[in-house]
Image (cartoon, rainbow, N blue to C red):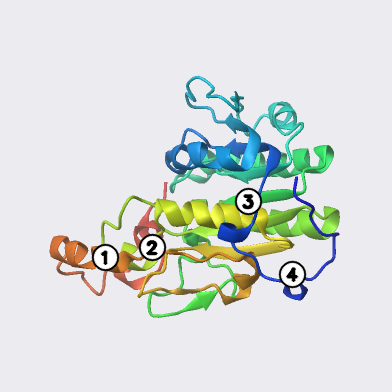
């Protein structure tokens, strides 16, 4: 694994890097949630930066490609996760429930499972985790506001709460055990933006790859929270506190704006979808 600095080094004291200029090579990387939407996108792209890519999910992962290890594991099974992280140098943790559900549905994988990942990392000496958090950690801020990661969490549902827990867990494991994490508050990562909200929250697949590689390769991250968005002209999020990660988005929702506005010419300004950054998540439930 690339040499990481000792626990306690201040990231602002180190030079900035970018994914495009960093030579990155791991022995073994773990990608959880590899059968999910973003997992399928990242799975072939991550092979370029590791000798072995270990992929895991509870859904069908197919046959292992060259340079892959397929290891199905339910995140709520502590023993299975402990075995999953053996020999792993870094983790891209996408696994878990990815949309709003009742708390009882979110709890096993997103909260218990994320704890298992961090505890297994502690036991096996894994020093960096890239955690798929979510913009729904701050979904109850209004779209008229611009916020950064230093402002208080305001989850918009049980899913957002679970990701807020994951970020707090990451901070604890940095402070207590020196395990570094970049928490990615992912916006809306799809081939293209499909509605007006996504004109602000869109993260292209190529920029998603750039963000993950930057999170893996930055020399020092401690626990850093960064919003996952492309270079959109309209945005609610300021990534200045995470500039040391070296993430430089290259795509923009501007190229899709005309099509989005043609499909969705009007939005009710009194609709919570148009008021809050979390969009429709703020109205889901109770379950």
User: Which numbered marker is on residue 4?
Assistant: none
Between marks 1 and 2, how big is the CA–CA gap?
9 Å
Q: Residue 87: x, y in percent?
A: 76, 32
The residue positioned 66% from the left and 38% from the top of the image is 29
Q: Residues within 10 Å of mark 2 (few under 14, many from 20)?
A: some
List the residue tagged with mark 4. 11
Between marks 2 and 3, how big is the CA–CA gap?
22 Å
Between marks 1 and 4, how big is the CA–CA gap?
34 Å
212 vs 25, nearest the viewer: 25
Proximity of marks 1 and 2: CB atoms separated by less than 8 Å: yes
List the residue tagged with mark 3. 130
Between marks 2 and 4, how big is the CA–CA gap?
26 Å
Between marks 1 and 3, how big is the CA–CA gap?
29 Å
When asked about the image quadrant of residue 202, the answer is bottom left
Nearer mark to the viewer, of 3 and 4: 4
List the residue tagged with mark 2. 251
245 vs 264, nearest the viewer: 245
Proximity of marks 2 and 3: CB atoms separated by less than 8 Å: no
Q: Earlier in the sequence, mark 1 or mark 3?
A: 3
Q: Is residue 258 above or below residue 92?
A: below
Q: Earlier in the sequence, mark 2 or mark 3?
A: 3
User: Which numbered marker is on residue 255?
Assistant: 1
Q: Dot 1: what SS? A: helix
Q: Residue 39: x, y in percent?
A: 49, 39
């Amino acid at each position: 694994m690339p040499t990481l600095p000792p626990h306690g080094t201040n990231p602002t004291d180190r030079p900035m890097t970018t994914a495009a200029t960093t030579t990155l090579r791991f022995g073994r990387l773990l990608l959880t949630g590899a059968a999910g939407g973003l997992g399928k996108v990242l799975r072939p792209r991550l092979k370029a930066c590791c000798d072995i890519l270990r992929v895991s999910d509870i859904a069908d992962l197919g046959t292992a490609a060259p340079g892959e290890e397929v290891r199905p594991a339910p995140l709520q099974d502590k023993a299975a996760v402990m075995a999953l992280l053996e020999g792993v140098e870094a983790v891209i943790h996408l696994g878990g429930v990815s949309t709003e559900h009742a708390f009882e549905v979110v709890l096993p994988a997103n909260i218990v499972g994320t704890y298992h990942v961090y505890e297994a990392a502690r036991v096996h000496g894994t020093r960096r985790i890239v955690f798929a958090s979510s913009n729904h950690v701050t979904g109850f801020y209004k779209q008229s506001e611009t916020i950064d990661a230093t402002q208080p969490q305001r989850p918009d549902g049980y899913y957002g709460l679970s990701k807020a827990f994951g970020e707090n867990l990451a901070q604890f494991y940095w402070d207590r055990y020196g395990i570094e994490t970049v928490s990615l508050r992912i916006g809306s990562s799809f081939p293209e933006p499909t509605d007006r909200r996504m004109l602000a929250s869109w993260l292209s697949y190529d920029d998603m790859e750039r963000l993950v590689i930057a999170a893996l390769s930055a020399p020092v991250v401690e626990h850093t929270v960064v919003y996952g968005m492309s270079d959109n002209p309209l945005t609610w999020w300021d990534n200045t506190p995470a500039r040391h990660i070296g993430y430089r988005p290259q795509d923009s929702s501007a190229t899709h704006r005309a099509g989005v506005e043609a499909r969705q010419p009007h939005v009710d300004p009194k609709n919570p979808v148009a008021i809050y950054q979390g969009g429709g998540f703020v109205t889901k439930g109770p379950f």
